[in-house]
């Protein structure tokens, strides 16, 4: 669910930036409606993830992780969840206030949440964009922290979520074993053996 959510967020941001680049009215409407549908899908998936957290078993914290880092990690995680829940609702409210409708993946029209109010729609659009850039910044911090844990701190934070990440380490276990096997081993000489036996007898 985490990686599905990440993929949907990447898609929803790509659609958001594509809306203003649309070359025709039809493509503008298509990007906008798809952006709204994917955004609501992110909201639904986030709710499912929040429910699932009460039943799922999570990996333990890395032993070297300080209490301050744990608090910071939990704070950023819950901030992400909060924005993922709030942002689609803001978009839906802005759509309703603007007098538009959400067509969920072009299948059916969803009922408006509030009545038409253009001044309110302008304010909600500003808030929606501000929250969107804040969310984008939090995602960048989240990704940077995960990569830092994997490549700098060398712990299992990322590999616990993505087993394939084991292959990203600079020295794989097989390569380390081959290097150890190829390294010259120290063989004690006869003189050192005699010296050791003399010391042990004393």
Image (tube, helix red, strand yellow):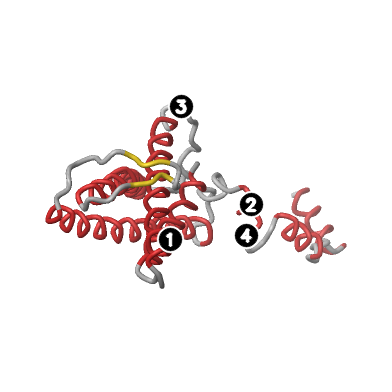
Q: Which residue is mark 3?
A: 55
Total numbered circles: 4
Label 1 to label 3, Cα distance in Å?
28 Å
Q: Which residue is mark 1?
A: 144
Above or below for 156 versus 52: below
Q: Which residue is mark 2?
A: 164
In terms of sequence position, does the residue under pointer 1 or pointer 3 come before the other?
3
Q: Position of residue 158 (x, y in %)?
A: 53, 50
For mark 3, give the secondary structure.
loop
Q: Position of residue 197 (x, y in %)?
A: 81, 53
In terms of sequence position, does the residue under pointer 1 or pointer 4 come before the other?
1
Q: Position of residue 102 (x, y in %)?
A: 34, 47
Label 2 to label 4, Cα distance in Å?
8 Å
Q: Residues within 10 Å of mark 3 (few under 14, many from 20)?
A: few
Label 1 to label 2, Cα distance in Å?
18 Å
Q: Is residue 182 left or right of residue 92?
A: right
Label 1 to label 4, Cα distance in Å?
16 Å
Pick the residue in front: 77 or 135. Answer: 135
In terms of sequence position, does the residue under pointer 4 or pointer 3 come before the other?
3
For mark 2, give the secondary structure.
helix
Check residue 5 in the rendering and tell me which mark sits there, or answer none: none
Q: Are marks 4 and 3 in contact (CB under 8 Å)?
A: no
**Which quadrant of the figure has residue 16?**
bottom left
In terms of sequence position, does the residue under pointer 3 or pointer 2 come before the other?
3
Q: Which residue is mark 4?
A: 168
């Amino acid at each position: 669910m985490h990686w599905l959510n990440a993929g949907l967020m990447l898609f929803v941001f790509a659609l958001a930036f594509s809306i203003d680049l649309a070359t025709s009215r039809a493509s503008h409407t298509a990007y906008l409606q798809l952006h709204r549908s994917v955004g609501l899908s992110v909201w639904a998936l986030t709710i499912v993830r929040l429910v699932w957290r009460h039943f799922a078993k999570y990996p333990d914290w890395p032993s070297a992780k300080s209490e301050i880092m744990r608090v910071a990690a939990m704070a950023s995680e819950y901030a992400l969840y909060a924005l993922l829940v709030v942002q689609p609702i803001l978009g839906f409210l802005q759509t309703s206030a603007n007098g538009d409708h959400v067509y969920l993946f072009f299948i059916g029209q969803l009922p408006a949440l509030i009545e038409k109010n253009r001044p309110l729609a302008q304010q909600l659009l500003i808030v929606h964009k501000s929250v969107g850039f804040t969310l984008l910044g939090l995602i960048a911090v989240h990704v940077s922290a995960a990569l830092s844990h994997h490549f700098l701190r060398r712990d299992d934070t990322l590999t616990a979520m993505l087993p394939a990440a084991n292959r990203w380490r600079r020295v794989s276990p097989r390569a380390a074993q081959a290097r150890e096997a190829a390294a010259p081993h120290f063989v004690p000489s006869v003189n050192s053996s005699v010296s050791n036996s003399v010391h042990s007898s004393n």
